[in-house]
Amino acid sequence: MLKKLAINGGTPVRTKLFPAYNTIGEEEKRAVMKVLDSGNLSQYLGAWTHDFLGGPTVRAFEENWSKAFGVKYAITVNSNTSGLFTAIGAIGIQPGDEVIVSPYSMSASAIAPLVYGGIPVFADIHPGTFCMDPVSIEARITPRTKAILVVHIFGHPADMDSIMSIAKKHNLFVIEDCAQAPMGKYKGKYVGSIGDLGVFSLNYHKHIHTGEGGVITTNNSSLADRCQMIRNHAENVTGPRELTDLTNLIGYNYRMTEMECAIGIEQLKKLPSLLERRLENVDFFNEKFSSFPAFETLPKLADGSVNTYYVYPVKFNKEIAGIERNKFVDALKAEIPSAVLRETAPLLGAGYVKPLYLQPIYQQKAAWAFNPALYNGDVSYEKGICPVTETMHFEILFTHEYMRPGMTISDMTDVVKAIEKIFENINELK
């Protein structure tokens, strides 16, 4: 008898690639051509002049972003990563300072403190949100702790009331990594407007993008000023401005170009409708996945909160399913393809990223910040320090991107059919 499942040689549910997620259109092309025709592709000067803050398109994009997100200041940078580095520098992190970070995020979220000699201290995640657990955050605080770097992972807002309360109690800065959560909300407030600083990504695989790019948000004029200086050769302006606090005001070039900001202006206009379509697709999967007892999805948020679903996370119950999560994910990958422009990067994965503290840089403490002359604390990166993260990653969680705008009901139905096929023939995998 022939095997029915594609992983065992059967015919897959679908072979045609899913549609590309492409948000670039004629509006962006016209905006870029306007900049190209002007001949002014960047207007920054690394000196204290009118052009220290960039050209007209950079400034227009920053103004539009600050209005859209309800913040006083928006500072463009060339990536979310450089935005995190800038934010860490702006709050004055120095060698030996500790910053509490998430173990379940893109690596830059945790590596940022090391740029200034700070020490990343990992707090465990909450099993219901995958964001940092406030209980674990508070347990990690020491006299060396200076900040909390929160990640709104997968687009789900972190528990900001609890985190801000902890920060106030211990006099800590809060940086929000909003790379995956543009226009996400926590109790009616946009993420990135609650802590001292927020950082957003405009990388090509985010909700909206400029190829590469990022935006820092804040309501603090002093922090905004320091971010603007760090972005653009700060050392050149400290003299003319007669500044006395020169902490971390050394030269970087994290500037965004006029062309990228022209694209950003048009992309920002599309963000609300793109998010609306994404959430409509999430509703489709929420309904369909409720019929699979082995799946547990995130509950619908209340109190004016919004999860932007950068990816759609599912907790897989191997006891109910009768098979391990990895075996299920491999079977599903065999039944359905990836997407146009993503041929080499599947839209489905087991877990997300390996807990960051298991990377060699932490295991070997291979950064100058760990020099005992600079840091004499006792930070641990041993396996087991964040048990919830490890369990979720290695055993329970899987994520997919089949709810991206551009996916039709027919496309998404194929995903559901593939899952139904696997569960109908589950004994093949046992």
Image: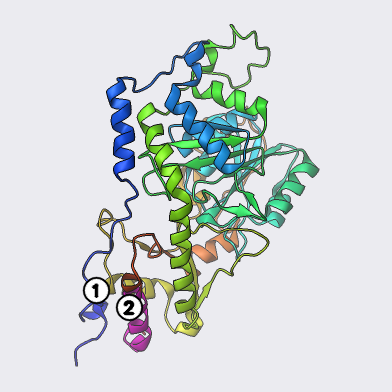
Q: Earlier in the sequence, mark 2 or mark 1?
A: 1
* Number of marks: 2
User: What kind of residue is marked 2?
Assistant: Ala
Whether residue 18 sits left or right of residue 110 in the image: it is left
Q: Is residue 421 found inside the magenta-colored segment of the image?
A: yes
Q: Which residue is found at the position 60% from the left and 53% from the top?
A: 185
Q: Which residue is found at the position 51% from the left and 48% from the top?
A: 182
Disc 1 target residue: 14
Whether residue 110 sits left or right of residue 197 in the image: it is left
Q: Secondary structure at mark 1?
A: loop
Disc 2 target residue: 418
Q: Position of residue 210 (x, y in %)?
A: 38, 39
Q: Which residues are magenta?
A: 413-428
Q: For residue 391, what is the image quadrant?
A: bottom right
Q: Which residue is found at the position 43% from the left and 27% from the top?
A: 57
User: Crowding near pointer 1: few (<14 within 10 Å), some, many (20+)?
Assistant: some
Which is the main secondary structure of the residues drawn in magenta? helix
Q: For residue 256, what is the image quadrant?
A: top left
User: Crowding near pointer 2: few (<14 within 10 Å), some, many (20+)?
Assistant: many
Along the line of sight, the residue nearer the viewer: 115 or 405 = 405
Alpha carbon distance from label 2 to label 1? 8 Å
Q: Position of residue 63 (x, y in %)?
A: 53, 32
Q: Which residue is found at the position 76% from the left and 48% from the top?
A: 165
Along the line of sight, the residue nearer the viewer: 118 or 332 = 332
Quadrant for the C terminus in the image: bottom left
Q: Position of residue 129 (x, y in %)?
A: 59, 62
Quadrant for the N terminus in the image: bottom left
Disc 2 to disc 1: CB gap under 8 Å = yes
